[in-house]
Amino acid sequence: MGTGANHRNKPSLAVIGTGIAGLSAAYLLKDEYRVTVFEGQARAGMGAHSVDYISNGITSRIDIPLRIFCRGYYDNLLALYEHIGVEIVTSDHSGIFADETGRVVLHYGNAYWGRTQFSYLKGRSWLSPAAWTIGLQSRQFFARAKRDAGRADLAGLSFGEYLRQSGAGEEFVDTVLLPLMSVTCTCDYQAVRDYPADMMLGYLACGVHDIGIMSAAKGVDDIVPRMLVDVELRTNSPIAMVEAAGERLRVVTKAGAEQHFDRVVIAAQAQQAAAMLSGFDNRRALLARIPFETSSMSVHTDEQILPAPAEGLSPVSYHIPRDSDRAEVSVDLTKAFARLSDQNTIFQTWNPLRRIAPNRELMRVDFTRPTVTRDSRQAAIALRECQQQPDNRLWLCGSYMADKIPLLEAAVDSSVAVAEQLGAAIPWKASAPATA
């Protein structure tokens, strides 16, 4: 943490939460404020649920959940990572889709020509009329999505309504698109359909299907310390209350410690932020309109989850029961990420529907993620308007606060917006920030 009179004369600012939103907000605001970061867990977030995996004499850190991204959509995230020196690598997330009986419906791989990714059918999918039908419907869907992405009327449609009106192929939607977007958005199929159509198409039309997936080469443990420079970090400090106290804000931990700050940024999920606020009734009511869903993630070595035969499978396996509202999606981490390729096979499975052998499971974590509806979008707009008031001292920051799918990019987008409103310069932007 910085020292000297200049630092002491800076206004004080609390950042509550150390997900990517809180970390990036703290990093961007540290030059303008004396930043204190509060985290309820024993270690700073993003890597709070990571687990060590030891095999073949090698120890690797497994991030839970995976943090993956792509060019064309994650502009601020990639600019931030480049600025702080995070090494980025390409990872393979080609997939195999199987029904509840284990029958493979579609199996494809990815290859690259320069920086362009293209997909091709693998194994028996070459001989499957269903796979060729899905492939054709996929090409038709993405071509139309790119044409439609700028349509002004999409904001008034849900994604489900758009799918019906556009005539998207049923086999592609049910077998690929809904399972793919349910794991991307970590929600069930109905929540995917409830998303605003323009928001969902903004993601799907960015070229994610043909530009490839990337990740941080060394995982989140390499990212977190790079963003906690020149700030004071207080772990094991869950927050009980944030309230107005004259011209400042009082922050009280659940242990009873309290401190006053000139500004406060709450970078927690909407329902958690609402529980902290005392006296901010309008914002609490708006936060209550932000929906969220709970998901489970398992890290394990149980190969029984794979379709047979397992040899030659793509890294991502989708198990799609007919009557389930979500798929079960497993990533073979040793195939998807080069840094794990010398270790024994290990999986990360989202929404485990089938039994995973207890002696094969390293970790299981439940977590919540926000989703977006047309109503919650209006609530987020109203929350952002609250933050533009001249006397505002409290900012909300997180993936639910940006007008995007609540992914890593939305979280960083929200922190950039807050930092600019608080007078901070954004290192990768040429334009001058607004004055707080």
Image: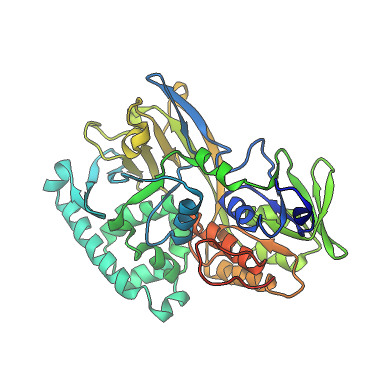
- Relative vertical location of residue 129 with respect to residue 263 in this rendering, above or below: above
Q: Which of 270 and 66 is in front in this view?
A: 66
Q: In this view, does 153 lie to the left or right of 392?
A: left
Query: Of all residues shown, which one is farthest toward the right?
Result: 246
Q: Position of residue 243 (x, y in %)?
A: 81, 59
Query: Of all residues shown, which one is farthest toward the top?
Result: 57
Q: Which of 83 and 211 is in front in this view?
A: 83
Query: Of all residues shown, which one is farthest toward the bottom?
Result: 152
Residue 56 visible in this rendered orientation of the protein? yes
The quarter of the rendered structure image containing the N terminus is: top right
Query: Of all residues shown, which one is farthest toward the left?
Result: 127
The quarter of the rendered structure image containing the C terminus is: bottom right
- Relative vertical location of residue 130 with respect to residue 417 in this rendering, above or below: above
Q: Count every numbered label the image shows and give the total.
A: 0
Residue 353 visible in this rendered orientation of the protein? no
- Relative vertical location of residue 35 with respect to residue 414 in this rendering, above or below: above
Q: Nearer the viewer, residue 135 or 119?
A: 119
Q: In which quarter of the image is residue 384?
A: bottom right
Q: Residue at left 47%, top 47%?
A: 85
Q: In this view, does 71 lie to the left or right of 81?
A: left
- Relative vertical location of residue 354 with respect to residue 96 in this rendering, above or below: above
Q: Position of residue 338 (x, y in %)?
A: 33, 36
Q: In this view, does 329 lie to the left or right of 51?
A: left
The colour scheme of the drawn protein is rainbow
Q: Residue at left 23%, top 63%?
A: 139
Q: Where is residue 194 in the image (x, y as percent from the top left)?
A: 47, 64
Q: Where is residue 149 in the image (x, y as percent from the top left)?
A: 36, 73
